[in-house]
Amino acid sequence: MDINELKDIFGECELCQDKVCVKSKLYEVLEYIKNNYSFNVLKSITAVDLGSDVELLYRLFSTEDEENAVISIKVQNEADSVIDLFESARADENEIYDMFGIKFIGNEDLKRLYMPENWEGFPLRKDYVQDDTRLAWNDNSDNA
């Protein structure tokens, strides 16, 4: 993958350590990479809470060239969904929504996967405050 070509086409792309960092146009960048560099598999999307932003890491694989690539973007509360580019993104987008609260624009089926629907907050955010009283249903001390 040619980082200079991506810079020429999309502007704010740079090589950061071992990943391509984009500031915007994530969907367009991923679509271009998929179509022009044969990265046809999305292995995973992961999220890291950096405090002020959440970094999303898209791990791609080319079955043709047997190469990996990582595309990164920092977001606050929302990002573009890529499920129409990679169907495998559906579960990762739901998990990131559930744990970090990132809304994926275009994913009409965002839902909690692990936490109850009425759960308040997003447990993997750094600003999340755990309220132990919500865990009382799991307290077996009365049965001892």
Image (spheres, grey):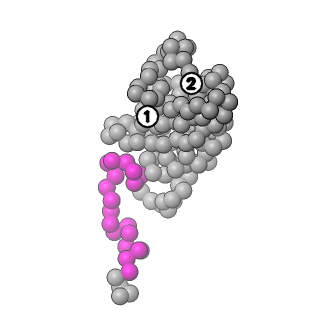
* Magenta-drawn stretch contains 142: no
Report the amino acid beneath label 1: Val
- At x 54% / y 56%, what residue is drawn? 113
Query: What is the spatial separation of the Cα atoms under label 2 and label 1, in whole angstroms?
Result: 15 Å
Q: Secondary structure at mark 2?
A: helix
Residue 107 shows up from this direction = no
Q: Secondary structure at mark 1?
A: strand
> Mark on residue 75?
1
Q: Position of residue 97 (x, y in %)?
A: 50, 47
- At x 32% / y 48%, what residue is drawn? 127
- At x 55% / y 42%, what residue is drawn? 44
Displayed quadrant of residue 37: top right
Q: Position of residue 105 (x, y in %)?
A: 56, 37
Which residue reaches farthest front?
66
Q: Is residue 119 left or right of residue 128?
A: right
Would you say the magenta stretch is mainly helix, strand or loop? loop
> Mark on residue 29?
2
Displayed quadrant of residue 27: top right
Displayed quadrant of residue 48: top left
Position of 34 relative to 91 (above/below): above
Q: Quadrant of the C terminus?
A: bottom left
Q: Which residues are magenta?
A: 122-140
